[in-house]
């Protein structure tokens, strides 16, 4: 007689679990609509597929990138029946590089997608809608990006340095010979960089490279080990040939090879020049940045006798132009090094009415010395997680106008609900097309006190 097992056996409730969709599997499906991030949505056997590179109405063959529960993430491998709205991607790397995910979509459709996403987030998450929609703020479709990070990794299997951009939904590095969204002065640097890095005696020491173009071009080389004299000379020669500054970063802050050379960017409309160091936050799209600042000043309409507050001020991108048109600007930032550089930018531009302070903007603001005296208007330009703690204190600061610049519609919607609860109405809102060829949405919203 067989021995009975003493263990308990459990049966899954609700029947057997459906097998998981394996990575790499190909699936033919019909795309029914677009998600807010620009991916196509299709349905197969009770699962929802999010497919990059697909448009509504298309029949496509998708390759699975990852799956969990009833959600499958994939990319379009072949378009079997194309939408009439599809266009040929201007970049040869569009389907592999993880940067520009909606190049197959006409620019007007990209703007409509971003507008719809902003409106849906404001209404669904914040329960607010603007009294007036501003037209999208746009710039060039291509050749707009003045800053880019180049991925670098030593490949032990091939014995070679991989140089390029990260692949979509992967840590793989895609070799890029040209990037249509990069500004023209950085194109030859991008093309020649891989060969130069691979020729180093110690290429394994390179972590990543950042490119920047403003008043001058700059190449920041992040290294994880000390570079020898010969490698330093090769990098210096490379930068001289491409008329760019060389910056190096080891364990500390980025350092210029030649500290006497100035680096920054100008905003001609206000005759200001902001000093910049690689690693600082800067808007990558110069034309849209200037248009954004101009729109912010137009919406805020500062008067010569008014006192303004700029929260999350960075290098002074908004504060210095504001100072040209108002009595005083108080600008606050959480990072002391940024405060120091912004203050120096004010001095360099002879703007004695712009004052910069360091503060943790999640702490109470009204009792700080710089907040005394009140403000006619407040401008906020927070990071992706928003400015909820600062917004919760807006009633204590009592400005008449609040202008919120956002890089995340979800946190803008959340913070809009808080402003509305404090007696502010959303007078005007609109998208900022800071990153054409991507589904990334930036927005501007103006609130006025009831």
Image (cartoon, grey):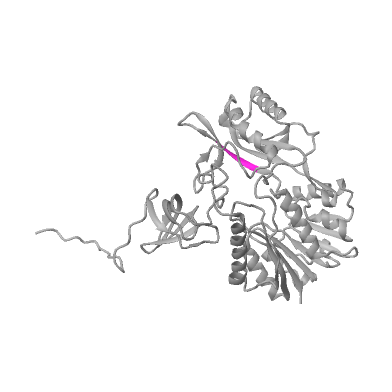
Outermost front residue: 84
Q: Determine the residue positioned at 27% across, 65% down.
A: 11
The quarter in which the C terminus is drawn is: bottom right
Drawn side of residue 98 relative to residue 245, left or right: left
Residue 446 visible, this angle: yes
Drawn side of residue 371 relative to residue 140, left or right: right
Across and down, in percent, residue 356 comes to: 81, 54
Across and down, in percent, residue 99 comes to: 57, 47
The quarter in which the N terminus is drawn is: bottom left
Number of marks present in the image shown? 0
Across and down, in percent, residue 107 comes to: 61, 55
User: What kind of secondary structure does the magenta stretch mostly adopt?
Assistant: strand
Quadrant for residue 187, please give it.
top right
Quadrant for residue 313, please give it.
bottom right
Drawn side of residue 325 relative to residue 414, left or right: right
Q: Determine the residue positioned at 19% across, 60% down.
A: 5
Give above or below for 82 relative to 418.
above
Q: The magenta stretch spans which residues?
A: 148-152
Q: Nearer the viewer, residue 191 or 180?
A: 180
Q: Determine the residue positioned at 62% across, 67% down.
A: 119
Give above or below for 410 relative to 79.
below
Quadrant for residue 71, please give it.
bottom left
Residue 221 visible, this angle: no
Outermost left residue: 1
Q: Determine the residue positioned at 49% across, 58% down.
A: 40
- Asked if the stretch drawn in magenta spans residue 5, the answer is no
Across and down, in percent, residue 168 comes to: 51, 47
Give above or below for 192 relative to 429.
above
């Amino acid at each position: 007689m067989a021995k009975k097992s003493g263990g308990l056996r459990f049966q899954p409730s609700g029947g057997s679990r459906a097998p998981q969709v394996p990575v790499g599997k190909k699936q033919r499906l019909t795309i029914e609509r677009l998600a807010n991030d620009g991916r196509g949505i299709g349905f197969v056997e009770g699962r929802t597929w999010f497919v990059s590179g697909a448009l509504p109405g298309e029949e496509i063959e998708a390759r699975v990138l990852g799956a969990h529960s009833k959600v499958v993430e994939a990319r379009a491998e072949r378009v079997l029946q194309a939408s009439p709205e599809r266009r040929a991607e201007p970049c040869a790397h569009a389907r592999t590089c993880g940067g520009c995910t909606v190049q197959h979509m006409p620019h007007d459709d990209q703007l409509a997608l971003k507008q719809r996403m902003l409106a849906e987030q404001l209404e669904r998450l914040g329960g607010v809608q603007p009294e007036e929609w501003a037209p999208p703020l746009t710039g060039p479709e291509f050749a707009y990006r003045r800053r880019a990070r180049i991925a670098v990794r030593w490949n032990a299997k091939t014995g070679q340095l991989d140089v390029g951009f990260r692949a979509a939904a992967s840590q793989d590095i895609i070799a890029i010979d040209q990037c249509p969204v990069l500004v023209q002065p950085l194109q030859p640097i991008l093309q020649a960089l891989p060969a130069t890095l691979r020729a180093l005696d110690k290429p394994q020491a390179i972590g990543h490279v950042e490119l920047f173009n403003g008043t001058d071009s700059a190449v920041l080389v992040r290294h994880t080990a000390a570079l020898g004299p010969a490698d330093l000379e090769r990098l210096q020669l490379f930068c001289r040939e491409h008329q760019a500054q060389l910056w190096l970063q080891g364990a500390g802050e980025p350092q210029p090879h030649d500290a006497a050379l100035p680096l920054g960017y100008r905003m001609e409309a206000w005759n200001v020049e902001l000093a910049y160091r690689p690693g600082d936050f800067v808007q990558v799209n110069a034309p849209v940045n200037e248009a954004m600042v101009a729109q912010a000043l137009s919406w805020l309409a500062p008067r010569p006798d008014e006192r303004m507050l700029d929260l999350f001020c960075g290098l002074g991108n908004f504060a210095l132009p504001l100072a040209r048109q108002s009595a005083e600007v108080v600008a606050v930032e959480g990072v002391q090094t940024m405060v120091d550089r912004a203050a120096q930018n004010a001095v360099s531009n002879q703007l004695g009415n712009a004052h910069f302070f360091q503060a943790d903007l999640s702490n109470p603001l009204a009792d700080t010395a710089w907040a005394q005296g009140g403000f006619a208007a407040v401008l906020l330009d927070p990071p992706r997680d928003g400015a909820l703690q600062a917004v919760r204190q807006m009633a204590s600061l009592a400005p008449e106008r609040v202008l919120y610049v956002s890089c995340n519609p979800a946190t803008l919607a959340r913070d809009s609900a808080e402003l509305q609860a404090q007696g502010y109405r959303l007078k005007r809102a609109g998208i900022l097309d800071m990153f054409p060829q991507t589904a990334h949405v930036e927005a501007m919203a103006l609130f006025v006190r009831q």
